[in-house]
Amino acid sequence: MCVDAVQFAEPPLAALTEFRRVLTPGGRLALTCWEAVDPADDRVPVRIQAVDLRRDLARAGFTDVEVHERPVWRQAERDLWEQAVAAIDPDPAVLSLQEEGRRSLDTFDSLRRVFATATAP
Ligand SMILES: C[S@@+](CC[C@H](N)C(=O)[O-])C[C@H]1O[C@@H](n2cnc3c(N)ncnc32)[C@H](O)[C@@H]1O
């Protein structure tokens, strides 16, 4: 299982290849991340521009690759950031969270939430 971290590998394909290496034959991978709604949109962070799970899970040799959008999860993220930004609290940690929330909300519609599963052959 890999939750919201595969985008930090350079490139993400390297992590997917490693997941395949460590899985026993028949082992299953479950992975969450974000992908660009439009890969040509320059508001999308470079790390996320590099994520294409359907393409790269196949390139890494996985079978039974399924990648599904999760709009309800994405909406939960929006709710989280909106509530964080609306909070009134001078704590530096909250102020930092609000900064990230404002940045995320500014370009929110440029990303979609995805959930992928695949099998190591
Ligand atoms: C969005 S967080 C998700 C963390 C955790 N999976 C979770 O759901 O709480 C992304 C994580 O990726 C880690 N990370 C960043 N660069 C990494 C790298 N090159 N290799 C492994 N992990 C990395 C960060 O430290 C961070 O913990």
Image (cartoon, helix red, strand yellow):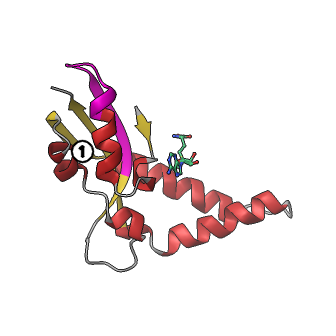
The image quarter in which residue 64 lies: top left
The residue carrying mark 1 has its beta carbon less than 8 Å from ligand 1: no
Asked if residue 113 shows in the view, the reply is no
Residue 60 visible, this angle: yes
Q: Residue at x 35, y 44 (%)?
A: 15
- Left/right of residue 65 with respect to residue 79 in the rendered view: left
Which amino acid does the dot numbered 1 rest on?
A: His
In front here: 85 or 45? 45
Helix, strand, or loop for circle 1? strand
Residue at 24% across, 44% down: 68
Residue 28 among those drawn in magenta: yes
Disc 1 designates what residue? Answer: 68
Residue 37 higher or lower than 52, as above or below: below
Give residue 43's position: percent from left, percent from top.
40, 78
Residue 73 in picture, x, y percent from top left: 42, 46
Q: Which residues are magenta?
A: 20-33
Q: Quadrant of the C terminus?
A: top left
How many other residues sit within 10 Å of disc 1, few (<14), some (14-19) or many (≥20)? few
Q: Quadrant of residue 50?
A: bottom left
Taking the magenta stretch, the answer to whether it contains residue 49 is no
Q: Residue at x 67, y 69 (%)?
A: 99
| Residue situated furthest bottom in the rendering | 42
Residue 107 horizontal/vertical position (percent) = 45, 73
Residue 113, image x, y percentages: 36, 52
- 36 sits left or right of 118 in the view: right
User: Which of 72 and 56 lies nearest the eye of the viewer?
Assistant: 56
In front of the other: 105 or 54: 54
Please state if 69 lies on the left or on the right of 90 as rendered. left
Residue name at image x 33 percent, y 38 percent: 18
